[in-house]
Image (spheres, rainbow, N blue to C red):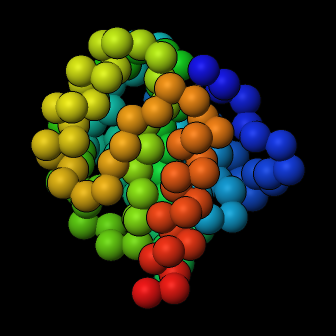
């Protein structure tokens, strides 16, 4: 699993939150949460705020790099799926437990969401979905 950013991409802004790091690019964002963090409804509002700042009137994608083990309250997906301009949600991990968790999370999110073991493939999928949504 590649966890570094792909070549020729420029980070627009990087945020260090109490639960981890969020990197904002031109048409997508990447989260890398800290080992042992718990992503709660309250904490996800920080991430939604970042989405509002950078993508208020623009379609974008979200990539969750699961380098570390952490807990997610599945109810956070109720808030995230309300954001209509998220056109792709990718999870990147090589851990089997993350694949099982993804299958549960997907039931709550109910929008385009896909699991990858390679960050480059995730990025290609996210960019393709965002580009396609911009032409609709």
**Left or right of residue 75, residue 4 in this image:** right
Against 52, residue 115 (above or below) is above
Q: Residue at x 75, y 58 (%)?
A: 12
Q: Residue at x 53, y 19 (%)?
A: 67
State the quadrant of the N terminus: top right
Q: To which quarter of the image does residue 88 belong? A: bottom left
Residue most extreme to the right: 8
**Left or right of residue 40, residue 61 in this image:** right
Against 132, residue 107 (above or below) is above
| Residue 56 appears in the rendering | no
**Left or right of residue 65, residue 45 in this image:** left
Residue 44 picture location, percent across and down: 35, 46
Q: Residue at x 24, y 21 (%)?
A: 100
Q: Residue at x 83, y 43 (%)?
A: 7
Residue 120 picture location, percent across and down: 64, 39
Residue 40 picture location, percent across and down: 27, 36
Residue 122 picture location, percent across and down: 54, 42
Against 102, residue 30 (above or below) is below
Q: Nearer the viewer, residue 107 or 79?
A: 107
| Residue 136 appears in the rendering | yes
State the quadrant of the C terminus: bottom left
Q: Nearer the viewer, residue 95 or 69?
A: 95
């Amino acid at each position: 699993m590649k966890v570094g950013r792909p070549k020729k991409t420029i980070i627009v802004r990087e945020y260090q939150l109490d639960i981890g790091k969020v990197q904002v690019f031109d048409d997508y964002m990447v989260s890398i949460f800290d080992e042992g963090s718990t992503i709660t409804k309250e904490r996800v509002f920080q991430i939604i705020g970042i989405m509002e700042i950078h993508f208020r009137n623009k379609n974008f994608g979200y990539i969750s790099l699961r380098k570390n083990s952490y807990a997610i309250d599945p109810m956070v997906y109720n808030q995230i799926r309300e954001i209509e301009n998220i056109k792709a949600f990718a999870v990147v991990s090589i851990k089997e437990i993350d694949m099982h968790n993804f299958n549960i999370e997907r039931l709550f999110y109910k929008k385009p969401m896909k699991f990858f073991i390679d960050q480059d493939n995730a990025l290609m999928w996210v960019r393709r979905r965002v580009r396609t949504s911009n032409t609709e």
